[in-house]
């Protein structure tokens, strides 16, 4: 295990609750992934398998991708958290994805700010994020959180921006 503290798995903001996954999230998780429009089929069973993988990864790494729900409505609107992704356990990536109907209201920024604070509390010094250069809304969220572009790489035909933020 790493020398870092385990990340808090229950985070609350003014409008949002980030909490551990439950099996009951499977249908909404698969619906969220289906919104990507990447010609993949995300069944509820696949959502359930994804949740099991995420929970197993959390046990191993001490970091987590967490469901995001609105506090007042109690509905699942997406996820936000830390993953190893293209980076490392020492300097993990922040990741988030929300249903389209929840875009444009500052939820991603609010959730991600809570995750950045939680990452800092683990003793880590730096976070990464990788995002398609075409994804302006996501890049705007990261900019608001103080991430700065490190480099751009190509993955197949797509440009990927690598951004970093110090937690000191």
Image (cartoon, rainbow, N blue to C red):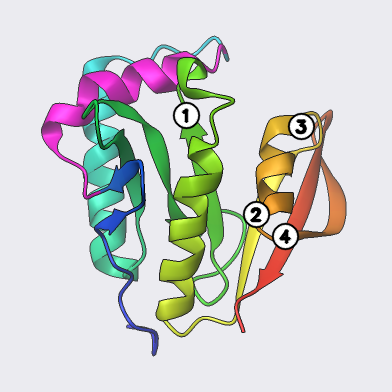
CA separation in Å, label 3 and label 4: 14 Å
Q: Which mark is residue 129?
A: 2
* Location of mark 1 (residue): 98
Q: Quadrant of residue 60?
A: bottom left
Image quarter in which the C terminus is found: bottom right
Q: Say above or below: 115 vs 4.
A: above
Q: Main secondary structure of the magenta part?
A: helix
Outermost residue, bottom side: 3
Q: Are marks 2 and 4 in contact (CB under 8 Å)?
A: yes
| Residue 83 visible in the picture | no
Q: Please state if 54 lies on the left or on the right of 134 as rendered.
A: left
Q: Nearer the viewer, mark 3 or mark 2?
A: 3
* Location of mark 3 (residue): 136
* Location of mark 4 (residue): 147
Find residue 126 and report its horizontal and vertical position in percent: 62, 75
- Magenta range: 19-37
- Look at 44% across and 14% down and name the residue there: 34
CA separation in Å, label 1 and label 2: 16 Å
First reached walking from the N terminus: tag 2 or tag 4: 2
Number of numbered discs visible in the structure rendering:
4
- Look at 39% across and 85% down and name the residue there: 4
């Amino acid at each position: 295990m790493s020398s870092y503290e385990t990340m808090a798995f229950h985070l609350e903001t003014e409008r949002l609750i980030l909490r551990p996954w439950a099996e009951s999230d499977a249908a909404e998780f698969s619906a969220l992934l289906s919104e990507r429009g990447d010609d993949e089929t995300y069944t509820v069973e696949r959502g359930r398998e994804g949740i099991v993988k995420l929970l197993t990864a959390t046990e191993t790494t001490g970091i987590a991708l967490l469901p995001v729900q609105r506090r007042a409505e109690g509905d699942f609107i997406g996820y936000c958290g830390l993953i190893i992704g293209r980076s490392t356990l020492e300097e993990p990536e922040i990741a988030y994805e929300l249903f389209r109907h929840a875009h444009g209201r500052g939820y991603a920024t609010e959730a991600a700010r809570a995750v950045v604070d939680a990452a800092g509390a683990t003793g880590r010094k730096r976070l990464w994020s990788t995002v398609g250069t075409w994804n302006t809304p996501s890049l705007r969220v990261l900019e608001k959180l103080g991430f700065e572009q490190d480099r751009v790489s190509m993955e197949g035909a797509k440009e990927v921006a690598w951004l970093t933020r110090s937690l000191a």
